[in-house]
Image: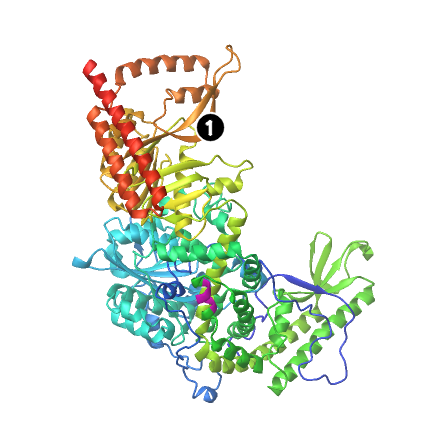
Amino acid sequence: MFTKPGVCGGSTAAGETSFSGRCSSSSSEPEPGRRPRYNFGLMETPRSGEGKGDGYSASESGGTSSTERLVQNNKLPSGSHTSGFTPGAANANNTSRDSCFADKSSFAGNNSVLSVLSAPSSSLCRDRDGARVGKTPLSAISHNTRSSCRMRTPQTGHSVTSSSAISAHCVASVIVAVVEGRGLARGEIGMASINLRSPELILSQFADNTTYSKVITKLQILTPLEIIMPNTACDKGTATKLFSLITENFKTVAFTTVQRKYFNETKGLEYTEQLCIPEFNTVLMEVQSKYYCLAAAAALLKYVEFIQNSVYAPKSLKVTFQGSEQTAMIDSTSAQNLELVINNRDPRNSHTLFGVLNYTKTPGGNRRLRSNILEPLVDAETINMRLDCVQELLQDEELFFSLQSVISRFLDTDQLLSVLVQIPKQDTVTAAESKITNLIYLKHTLELVDPLKAALKNCKTSLLKAYCSSLDDNRFNIILDKIKTVINDDTRYTKGCLNMRTQKCYAVRPNINEFLDIARRTYAEIVDDIAGMITQLGEKYNLPLKTSFSTARGFFIQMNTDGVILPSGQLPSEFMKVTKMKNAYSFTSVDLIKMNERCQESLREIYHMTYLIVCRLLSEIYEHIHCLYKLSDAVSMLDMLLSFAHACTLSDYVRPEFTDTLAIKQGRHPILEKISVEKPVPNNIYISEGSNFVIITGPNMSGKSTFLKQIALCQIMAQIGSFIPAEYASFRIAEQIFTRIGVDDDIETNSSTFMKEMKEITFIIQNANDRSLIIIDELGRGTSTEEGVGICHAICEYLLNLKAFTLFATHFLELCHLDALYPNVENNHFEVQHTRKSPQTTEKITYTYVLSKGHTEEKNYGLKAAEVSSLLPSIIHDAKEITSQISKQLWQKQMSTPESLRQRAVYRLATRLVQTARNSCLDANSLRVYFRGLKKRYESDCLATEEATEMEVEE
């Protein structure tokens, strides 16, 4: 039998199922596989929303999917495939107990697994902030140590039933290995990550600067459960800069150091070759010279084997390589400022960009959406393919609803694959139950392939055609046919722990194993006896007793107290373990406990024999199982595209274009639009290479910060393939998105408001390039006005040397005069209106939230805002007088010289002509009209220059 005979074999769902009715055992011999006479309430396939969660875990890789790359290269996937290696198939029947894939040997040798973690026993490495990093000694690694590791690490073998499906991906489950080159190679980073719920190994290698911004950003996106680094990173208490930065930024993440020898690139390449499935083996050519990511992969795979107490079967992992150039970089501070996936006020609140776009129906789609928001695409061709799909889904209502209906019935395919490809080193009750459960899930998933293919049959866009073609694979039918020869046709995924338990017990067809049929008859009789005994107890005491079931308690008795009068106000003494919740009692009896034990023993026998049959079946279908990777990719991507289309139907969104300009007409803030009762005020923005630096001024609360965030959010939406809340939108692909928003200090790092501002702006200056989008709000407010203006002026001049698109909101009106020195500076401001009901009343400010050209003409709007507050009138009066005196001393009006105006007019004309030559799609007549308009505008600017010259001569 199993090594854990006392473990309950119930489902993982914690819910309870109740049933009632007279049940008694029968003396007649039942047919093989007879089920209990009570009704299990078998349910139809779950519909929309089941198995969907709202937590975030980053197992889906950001960037371009494999199918999208095939479409770009005009290589649509066909039904042909390369057969994978079937390990141990020849001697599968000779083993004393059949393993799921017969071969239980580790790909790297199991004998050395116990020496993975570092010694000595008493060493603990602490970084400068005191972060504790565990180093498990060799002598301490035993079964108990391994158990504690598994308690800390999410188990991949649990069943995804109605409750666990919702929460399965809410918990971090990604383990990451990080290694840095030494000596001249310092700054070269290798990373390998694997999600314990998804059989995908992601490799990354890139050069980073001294701030290690790329490493921190990638780790923030992955949200790791645990980070592994070499023990040399913190030898003798002296931590490397990379180690210190990671431990400083991830204080709640578990850290483990392993011996440097396990970061072995030769072993890493060997493991990768052994584990990579044939469909993705082209990655081997890409990574064979990436020594650091291969070294990280070697240590990661060995460590995962240790903590999971299982190994991955040969040719079972999807291995992908992600360079830093494939997606846009959004640092963690910017992601937090923009509230991309987490609301700053309340983390449980869905008022985020993720919440606005998340109408996904599957955990895989949920993960893919999150990873794409944090890592938008930078390839315009891929983005436009996604936009084509969204447009077709919006135009074809039948396609949208048929696809949504099928997609919503899928479970977590990634997690299903992860469990199927892992080989447990010990055959336990939990492992057996998990394999049986996941075979049922596999059958359920494969039965949805044909409906999904039928829904995509008449699609027109290239990406949807590619996904439809990828489903036209005969391996799906081969696997399903093999499963149906062993598994009952009516076995299916159902909600409820008792329902799913019954499905597992009667999954295998009758007459395949005579002993299994006998065990099932025994189980059915015990269950019938339990129901009959409870009915007899109800008749004996004249009480409305009902049979109930939960995973933790097994069968127990439940009684509703409504209208029930108990003798002496107490339950009969025969009942024990009594609990009361509201108007119901739950209890059991000695006889019922004994019958539950008999039931569990019978259940273990059933699971054991079913497990042996399932293992033989899995060994037969394993060579075909790699087609599920295509299915998983298709389902998650289609789910995300459906989510984009769904979001478009709820609001007025428009398809964005990609040019060299950022131009938005009547754009709206996507989050504000969703949560506001009234429709937000739309605004226009135009940024090009000729006017790439926009200074925005306006009174407090006029809408500057909201507008800046709106631009960044719309940019991200466009680059992930979503439509935009606007009437028209054109974007330049941004390789990096930086923000400097907020004026808070940081107690943890002992940083004042001003110091935090300087750190954030330093990060931007060190990492920005010509293809960046930079959002800066309220810089320099943490120090004196003179110093703040000086620092802002210097930073603006530095950023003006770049071709990055920059939006700079400020209260320093002195910065507005930069347009006189630099022709690529534009001034915009938010308008306000002054209203006074009568001459005796105080003047009030009405915010229009409308963005207009030029800098604000408002003076002392801070004082006007203070008047609205409860500040004493005498203080307001004194403040006005002091402000007036200071303004006379400091304010010197600066006028643009005629020469600067002339240069500005020429510069604007030249940039508009270049822009037209690059991106214009106008016909000849429309182009002539546009050129006439440019000519009139240039003549008008020249006339203004002449008038300024005449005024200067007169003076």
Q: Is residue 925 magenta?
A: no
Residue 716: x percent and y percent? 40, 48
In this orientation, does residue 20 appear? yes
485 relative to 258, above or below = below
Stretch of the chain drawn in magenta: 464-468
When asked about the image quadrant of residue 549, the answer is: bottom right
| Mark 1 residue crowding within 10 angstroms, few (<14) / some (14–19) / many (20+) | few
Residue 674 lies left or right of residue 930; in this view the side is right
Residue 873: x percent and y percent? 45, 14
Residue 494: x percent and y percent? 62, 67
In this orientation, does residue 171 appear? no
The quadrant of the image that shows the N terminus is: bottom right
User: Which amino acid is tagged 1?
Assistant: Thr
The quadrant of the image that shows the C terminus is: top left
The residue indicated by pointer 1 is: 848
When asked about the image quadrant of residue 192, the answer is: bottom left
**Which residue is drawn at the image coordinates 49% and 47% (left, top)?**
356
**Which residue is drawn at the image coordinates 41% and 44% (left, top)?**
729
When asked about the image quadrant of residue 774, the answer is: top left
**Which residue is drawn at the image coordinates 50% and 54% (left, top)?**
643
Q: Is residue 467 magenta?
A: yes
Q: Which of 634 and 57 is in front in this view?
A: 634
Residue 73 lies left or right of residue 554; in this view the side is left
